[in-house]
Amino acid sequence: MLKMVSQELINYIKTQEDKGFSKQQLKSHIVKYGYSEAEVEEAFRELKGVEKPQSPLPTQGNVKRRNPFLVLVLSFITLGIYNIIWLVLTSKELRRNVASAPNPKLLWILLIPIINFLFMFYYYYKYCKALNEFTGFSTIGSYILFLLINPVGMVLAQLELNKKA
C-alpha cells in the first residue's frame, strides 16, 4: 500500500500543470529531486480525484457579467444592432443553463421584412420564459418590458443575468 503523498507535492504538480507542463515532464523532473515514481503517480491520481468537483447545477460561470448601462448605450449608439448581438449572446448563455431557451440561430429570421416583427413576439416570449426559469424574474413582466420598453427590459434582464455570473 502506498503512503499518503504530501499536499505540498500535489500543490506543486497543480501549479506546474497550470503553467502548461505535461505529466511526463513533471514526472521526470520530480523523480530527479528524490520522489519515487510511485509517489508521483499517487500524487497525480489524488490530484485527478479532487481537481474538478462536478456541480449538479451548471449555472456558475456560464453567464458573462456585462455592464447594463453599457448594454443600453451600445444599443442606442449602434441603432439597435448591439441589441441583436446582446440577444444572441445572452440566448446562448441561457441555452447552456435552461433547455427551453430559444435558439439564437432563429434570429436570422429578423432579416425577413414583416415576418421579423411577428417573430419577435414569439422569440421574446421564449426568451423571457427561459430567463424566468434561470433567474426567477417574472416571465410576463419581462415580456411586457421587452415589447413596450425594450431598453428597460434589456437592462433588467442583464441585471438578473449578472446575479448568476
Image (cartoon, rainbow, N blue to C red):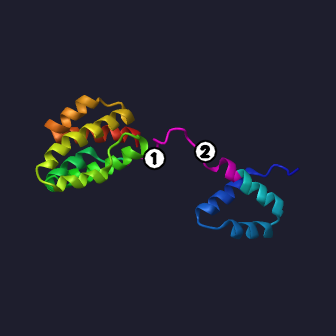
Identify the disc placed on residue 61: 1
Identify the disc placed on residue 53: 2
Q: Residue at x 22, y 52 (%)?
A: 84
Does residue 50 show up magenta in the picture?
yes
Residue 163, above or below 91: above
Does residue 130 show up magenta in the picture?
no
Depth order, front residue of 19/62 = 62
In percent of width and height, residue 8 lies at 72, 53
Span colored in magenta: 47-64
Depth order, front residue of 8/131 = 131
From this viewpoint, which residue is outermost toward the left?
A: 114
Depth order, front residue of 109/78 = 109
Marks 1 and 2: in contact by CB < 8 Å? no
Residue 17, above or below 97: below
Regarding residue 74, the answer to whether it shows in the image is no
- Magenta segment main secondary structure: loop
Describe residue 159's horizontal placement relative to residue 82 as left or right.
right
SS of the residue under disc 2: loop
Describe residue 99's horizontal placement relative to residue 50 as left or right.
left
Q: Residue at x 37, y 44 (%)?
A: 94
The amino acid sitting under disc 1 is Gly
Quadrant of the snapshot with the C terminus: top left
Q: Residue at x 81, y 49 (%)?
A: 4
